[in-house]
Image (cartoon, helix red, strand yellow):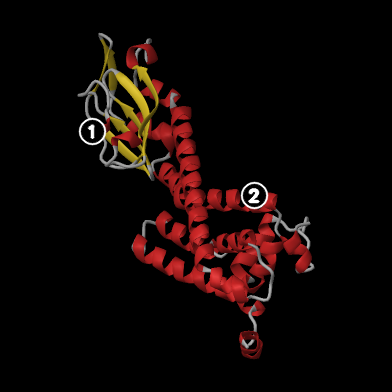
Amino acid sequence: MDSIAKKNNLKPDKKLTVMDIFMTSLVRTRELAITSIKTSTAKFVAYVIFLSLFAGLVSFGAPCVSKVASFGGFTNLFTTKVPAFEMKDGVLKADKQFKMNISKGTILINTDIDRFKFEDFDKEGIYVAIGSKYTKMVSITDIKDKNSYNEIYSYNNQMLFAEGFNNDLLVKMIPLFYIMLFVTYVGISIFKGLKYLVWAVLLTISSLSLLKVVKLDMSLKDAFRLSFYAQTFSIILVNINEGIGYVVSSLLASIIGAIITVVNIHKAMGPHMPDIDEFMNGEE
């Protein structure tokens, strides 16, 4: 039990679950200050992971599943819509180029070039890029920065498709595409989690004045947890907006989310603020 918990006669609650924190963050925001003090470090870390994965699921996972279902699954796609392939003299040839976006993941086929390079991509994301001589899986986090280009793997087509290549073999590669989607999902979730943690730090700094007058003895660690929990509703809102294709602009959704978060922090602190008489007496 830490000293802050002792001063508030609060102990870390071992029975407090991630779903308890989630529901408190959504519908019982006035209890968030107490919840942040009672949360153990392990439970806080678990909540960060949960909310990050949830955000990735809403913004990427669900739209991705919907997209795959819309074309009848990868098997139907590769047998009816993808161009025909042929391996000839160690070089892969397709009768036309092909591009398919699945949220932030993209499948590219262009056998007019030997291999895809950074300059051949036009936006950030995860790609399975098939050229005439090489098949690559790459990630790009900043299309303006070549250093953000990372080749997850790169295989020579002659080695990869030693027995030839056709649409039926592409069907056999379906697990690879699911791996691509899973890697994308994990990467997006990690990025979002780190972003929310950075915002929690900034919100904690901006809330330091409240800590000086609040009747609860909150440590910076408690305030940091509170700042993260207070983002829950806005995180859901922003990611749902992203997942359904931006009903409102990303900027407007972020502004609305930021306002909601600040309001939640003040609602959580409100029950523990001194009334005007206590404040004035403290000033004398």
Q: Which mark is residue 46?
A: 2
Horizontally, residue 119 falls left or right of residue 213, namely left
Can residue 56 be seen here? The reply is no
Q: Amino acid at mark 1?
A: Glu
- Residue drawn at (48%, 58%) of the image: 199
Q: CA distance from mark 2 to mark 1?
A: 39 Å
Residue 119 circle label: 1
| Residue 63 horizontal side relative to residue 251, left or right | right
* Quadrant including the N terminus: bottom right
In the rendering, at what x and y percent does residue 147 appear? 32, 34
Residue most extreme to the top: 89
SS at mark 1? helix
Task: Give percent across and percent down for residue 18.
Answer: 67, 55
Neighbor class of circle 2 (other Cα within 10 Å; few <14, some 14-19, many 20+) is some
Q: Is residue 142 left or right of residue 112?
A: right
21 is higher (above) or lower (below) than 137? below
Element class at badge 2: helix
Left or right, 217 with reference to 230 = right
Three-letter residue code for mark 2: Ala
Residue 282 placement: quadrant: bottom right
In x, y percent, where is residue 132? Answer: 26, 20
The image quadrant that residue 9 belongs to is bottom right
